[in-house]
Image (tube, rainbow, N blue to C red):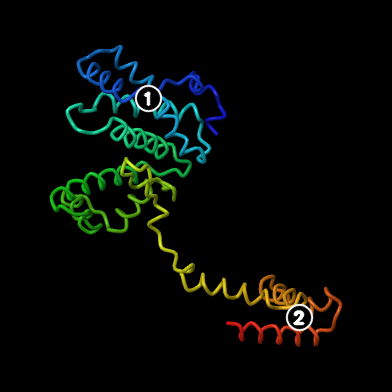
C-alpha cells in the first residue's frame, strides 16, 4: 500500500536516505551533545525504517500520512533517549519505540470506542501490573492486580479489571516478530508459536493415504466419492447428475469405500 505511494506526509519516499552504521554512530554521538543538525540528519536518515514499520499496519485502513507522522514521533523519541554508551544497535532500540507509538495511536483512535472510565481503569491496572512485576519478579495474576488497585480505596472486581485491560489491547498480527537474533535474519513470528490441534502429523499422513487410495478408484467411483463426501451431495442428487439410478450409485459407492478401506 505505502510503497505504491511516492509521497507520504510531504516526504518523497523514493529519495529516502540510507545511513551506514558508522555514519549513524557518529551522528548519534554528535546529537547526544546537542548538535541539532546531526539530530535532523539522523531523522532524515531513518525515515526508511519508519516507512518499513508502518507498512505492517497497512491492513488497518488508516491514513498513511497520519501513521507515518506518528512513526516519526517514535523515531524522534528514540533518537532523543538513545544511550550511546550501551552496546546496542540504534535500530534495535528504535523499532519497538516506533511500533509502540503507532500502537498507542491506533489504540486511542480505535473504531471500537472504549469509555473513558474503562480506559482510566485499564491504565491504572497496567501501572499496578508493572509495579507488581518488579516486586514479585514474575507476571502478577489478575487477582493480585485487582487487590493492588483496591488498596487505594477503590472497589473493582476481578472481572472489571480483566475487561478493562482487554478492552485497550491492540490485536496482534500472526506475523508479528517476537524474536530475531540479528545475525541470520531469521525471525520468529507469533504464528510459529501456535499449535494446531487439527493438523497433526497423524491427520496429515491420513490425508495423504486417502488421496493415494482415491487414485486407485475408477473415474466414476472417484467422482461419486468426491460428490458424496467432499461436496455433500445425496445419492439421489448424484444419480440425477450423472444419469444412473440411485441403486447404482449406492453399489458404486459401497464398492469404492471397500477399495479405500482395503488400501488403508
What is the crowding at mark 2: few (fewer than 14 residues within 10 Å), some, or many (at least 20)?
A: some
* Viewer-side residue, 132 vs 211: 211
Residue 69: mark: none
Q: Position of residue 111 (x, y in %)?
A: 48, 41
Q: In the visual, does 115 lie left or right of 126?
A: right
Residue under circle 2?
235
Q: Mark 2 and mark 1: span between their CA atoms?
A: 65 Å
Above or below, 35 relative to 125? above
Residue at 56% x, 27% y: name it: 5
Above or below, 40 relative to 117? above
Quadrant where the C terminus is found in the figure: bottom right
* Viewer-side residue, 145 vs 230: 230
Residue at 29% x, 22% y: name it: 22
Residue at 44% x, 28% y: name it: 68
Above or below, 72 relative to 121? above
Q: In the visual, does 117 lie left or right of 260?
A: left
Do tag 2 and tag 1 residues touch (Cβ < 8 Å)? Answer: no
Observer-side mark, 2 or 1, equals: 1
Residue found at the far right of this picture? 243
Q: Earlier in the sequence, mark 2 or mark 1?
A: 1
Dot 1 falls on a residue whose secondary structure is loop
What is the crowding at mark 1: few (fewer than 14 residues within 10 Å), some, or many (at least 20)?
A: many
* Viewer-side residue, 11 vs 185: 185
Q: Quadrant of residue 183?
A: top left
Residue under circle 1?
46
* Viewer-side residue, 98 vs 70: 98
Q: Quadrant of residue 87?
A: top left
Above or below, 64 relative to 32? below
Amino acid at each position: 500500500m505505502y510503497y505504491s505511494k511516492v509521497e507520504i506526509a510531504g516526504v518523497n519516499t523514493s529519495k529516502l536516505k540510507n545511513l551506514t552504521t558508522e555514519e549513524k554512530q557518529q551522528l548519534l554521538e554528535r546529537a547526544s551533545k546537542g548538535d541539532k543538525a546531526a539530530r535532523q540528519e539522523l531523522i532524515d536518515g531513518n525515515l526508511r525504517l519508519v516507512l518499513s514499520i508502518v507498512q505492517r499496519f497497512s491492513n488497518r485502513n488508516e491514513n498513511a500520512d497520519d501513521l507515518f507522522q506518528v512513526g516519526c514521533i517514535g523515531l524522534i523519541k528514540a533518537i532523543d533517549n538513545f544511550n550511546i554508551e550501551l552496546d546496542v544497535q540504534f535500530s534495535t532500540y528504535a523499532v519497538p519505540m516506533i511500533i509502540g507509538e503507532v500502537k498507542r495511536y491506533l489504540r486511542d483512535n480505535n473504531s471500537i470506542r472504549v469509555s473513558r472510565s474503562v480506559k482510566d481503569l485499564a491504565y491504572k491496572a497496567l501501572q499496578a501490573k508493572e509495579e507488581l512485576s518488579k516486586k514479585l519478579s514474575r507476571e502478577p495474576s489478575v487477582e493480585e492486580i485487582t487487590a493492588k488497585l483496591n488498596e487505594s480505596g477503590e472497589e473493582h472486581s476481578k472481572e472489571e479489571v480483566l475487561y478493562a485491560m482487554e478492552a485497550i489491547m491492540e490485536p496482534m498480527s500472526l506475523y508479528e516478530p517476537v524474536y530475531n537474533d540479528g545475525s541470520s535474519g531469521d525471525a520468529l513470528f507469533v504464528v510459529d508459536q501456535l499449535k494446531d490441534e487439527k493438523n497433526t502429523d497423524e491427520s496429515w499422513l491420513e490425508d495423504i493415504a486417502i488421496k493415494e487410495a482415491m487414485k486407485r478408484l475408477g473415474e466414476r467411483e472417484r467422482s461419486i466419492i468426491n460428490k458424496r463426501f467432499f461436496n455433500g451431495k445425496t445419492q439421489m442428487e448424484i444419480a440425477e447428475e450423472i444419469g444412473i439410478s440411485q441403486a447404482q450409485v449406492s453399489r458404486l459407492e459401497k464398492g469404492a469405500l471397500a477399495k479405500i478401506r482395503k488400501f488403508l
